[in-house]
Amino acid sequence: MSYGLFALKAPAYQRDVTFLKRYGTSKFRLIQMASVRTKGVELPKKSPKYSVNDQKLDNNICRARSKIREYGFCNDWSLFVTLTLDPSKMDVFDLSALNRTLSQWFRDYRKKHGVNVKYLLIPEKHKSGAIHLHGFLLGLPVSHLRLFHSSEHLPYYILNQLSQGKLLYTWPAYEQKFGYVVVEPIRNKDRAVSYITKYVTKDLALAVSDLGAHLYYSSQGLAKATELKRGRLTKEFIPDFQNDFCRGKWYSQRDTSEQRLREYIL
């Protein structure tokens, strides 16, 4: 006998649900969802065969950007990193293999040096299909890095930053294993999170769907947003983001209080 959603004891989805979440110590977000999966309800299995369409891509992009912002704001990232790959060291086109190799390398690095380095990385593909990554690091001691010097043969971007007195580093251990790398201190966390989120594009979503890969890569055990309240929205708000599935608005603790935001939800 075939069972569909009508046979479930509880509704598979709850409609029109609003959440209040805290991100780190200084940000809140109101999120109104058109529908939310009911916890503990098992859905009928779907065929593993599917086609990548615009709606699925938009959903994937929306979820990935939301998760990147969550990890970005909820963790104490100290370094922004751009990781490139030397084609003589590994396949620069194989994103899935890169994820496996890189995650294992980070695990080995933690054990070898006794440091709890964590990462949040977003891949970017050149027109050639070659991969590099942008993202955040925490827990990596600056003593493991080496400062770039203007006397070196360096790209214009780095020389320009150095001429302005900014500190940019290479990571010798990564460079030896994978290729060229640039590391710099995060000077403005909000801008940095906004910047890396923009790398999650439709072109990237199409590319990784074909490869069966992911839109971002992250360490296990990263801090996540705290759900403060959920229920029915009782006070209107002007969203700063909206699509067919959800709408939301960011708030700063400097501008409003948790108690005031709780009043939006019954």
Image (cartoon, rainbow, N blue to C red):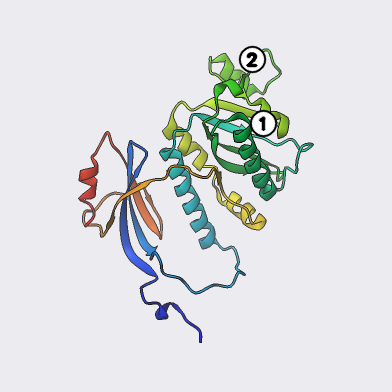
Disc 2 versus disc 1: nearer the observer = 1
Badge 1 crowding class, 10 Å Cα cut-off, few under 14, some 14 to 19, many 20 or more, is some
Picture quadrant of residue 82:
top right
User: Callout 2, which amino acid?
Assistant: His
Q: Is residue 102 above or below residue 206?
A: above
Q: Is residue 151 left or right of residue 64?
A: right
Q: Position of residue 180 (x, y in %)?
A: 69, 30
Query: To which residue does mark 1 refer?
Result: 174
Which residue does the image show at 25% across and 57% down from the upper left?
233
Residue 125, can we see it? Answer: no
Residue sitting nearer the eye, 100 or 231: 100
Q: Position of residue 100 (x, y in %)?
A: 66, 47
Badge 2 crowding class, 10 Å Cα cut-off, few under 14, some 14 to 19, many 20 or more, is some
Q: How far, Cα to Cα, is label 2 from label 1?
A: 18 Å
Which residue does the image show at 56% across and 40% down from the upper left?
121
Element at label 2: loop
Residue sitting nearer the eye, 97 or 261: 97
Query: To which residue does mark 2 refer?
Result: 149
Q: Is residue 8 above or below residue 111?
A: below
Residue 213, can we see it? Answer: yes
